[in-house]
Image: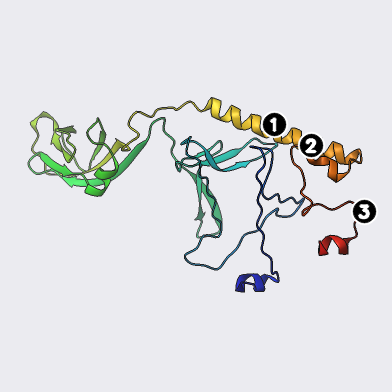
């Protein structure tokens, strides 16, 4: 047993494997009512508590992990491309009122894939040159149009942006002004490699997942019906989710016999 296993009072190792048809067989199934159906823990500072891997080669949108709420319909998926999609909100939970309460802060959503940065500058005789942070610039495509928003920090005729390049941009005072005030800026640019992504239609993808869930529910109902009718476990191989001899036992087996098995 590992030290973590000893601390928990268990000495267990499991390998679940199946070579059944696609979607019809599961390597491991954990079920519970008012308890966790699965618990994973370790004490490592370098190894994952849980590693989930999908070796799909034919689809960049193949799912590695899916979570689903049967009655409320909320779901999240993570694909082999590292894309995270959730039907609910994406939020952070932070302390408020000196830790007396916790509140949610919600992530800003956009129809396009933008990265943004913030900074400050100083006009000198009505103009300033702003150089983009090189690391930020390497994550976006400044070769296509990006947007800069300015906030003057003092009285002036107003500010405008010109000469936008991949390295930076210029800020000038309106009407040929010669102020030397400070200003703040916010820049948003398209993420490199995602320049043409906008409101991607994923309807078919989610319809397919719903169909798969429907099939799983039907298979479970078939199995429950077979058990209720007293069908022997040996004859359950014709159902989509068979029990192998090594994993099955009859309902009449004693608790001691099941534990030993």
Relative side of 94 to 146, left or right: right
The 10 Å Cα crowd at callout 2, few under 14, some 14 to 19, many 20 or more, is few
Please give the residue where the numbered disc 2 appears in the rendered image: 238
The 10 Å Cα crowd at callout 1, few under 14, some 14 to 19, many 20 or more, is few
Mark on residue 161? Answer: none
Which of marks 1 and 3 precedes in the sequence? 1
Picture coordinates of residue 184, whole percent (x, y): 24, 43
Relative side of 243 to 170, left or right: right
Please give the residue where the numbered disc 1 appears in the rendered image: 214
Picture coordinates of residue 148, whole percent (x, y): 25, 35
Please give the residue where the numbered disc 3 appears in the rendered image: 252
Q: Quadrant of residue 189?
A: top left
Relative side of 210 to 148, left or right: right
Question: For the C terminus, which image quadrant?
Answer: bottom right
In the image, residue 199 above or below residue 54: above
* Observer able to see residue 130: yes
């Amino acid at each position: 047993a590992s030290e973590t296993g000893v601390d928990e009072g268990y000495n267990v190792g499991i390998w679940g494997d199946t070579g059944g048809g696609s979607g019809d067989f599961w390597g491991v199934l954990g079920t519970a009512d008012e308890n966790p159906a699965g618990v994973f823990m370790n004490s490592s500072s370098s190894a994952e508590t849980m590693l989930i891997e999908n070796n799909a080669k034919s689809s960049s949108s193949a799912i590695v992990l899916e979570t689903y709420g049967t009655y409320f319909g909320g779901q999240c998926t993570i694909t082999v491309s590292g894309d995270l999609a959730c039907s609910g909100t994406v939020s952070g939970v932070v302390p408020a009122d000196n830790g007396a309460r916790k509140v949610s802060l919600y992530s800003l959503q956009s129809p396009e894939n933008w990265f943004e940065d913030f900074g400050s500058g100083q006009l000198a005789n009505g103009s300033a040159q702003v150089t983009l942070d090189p690391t930020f610039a390497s994550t976006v495509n400044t070769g296509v149009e990006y947007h800069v928003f300015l906030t003057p920090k003092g009285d002036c005729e107003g500010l405008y942006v010109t000469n936008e390049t991949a390295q930076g941009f210029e800020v000038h005072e309106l009407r040929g002004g010669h102020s030397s005030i400070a200003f703040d800026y916010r820049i948003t640019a398209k993420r490199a490699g995602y320049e043409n992504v906008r409101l991607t239609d994923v309807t078919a993808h989610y319809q397919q997942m719903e169909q798969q869930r429907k099939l799983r529910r039907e298979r479970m109902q078939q199995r429950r019906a077979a058990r209720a009718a007293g069908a022997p476990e040996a004859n359950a191989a014709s159902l989509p989710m068979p029990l192998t001899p090594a994993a099955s036992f009859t309902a009449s087996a004693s608790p001691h016999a099941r534990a030993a098995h």
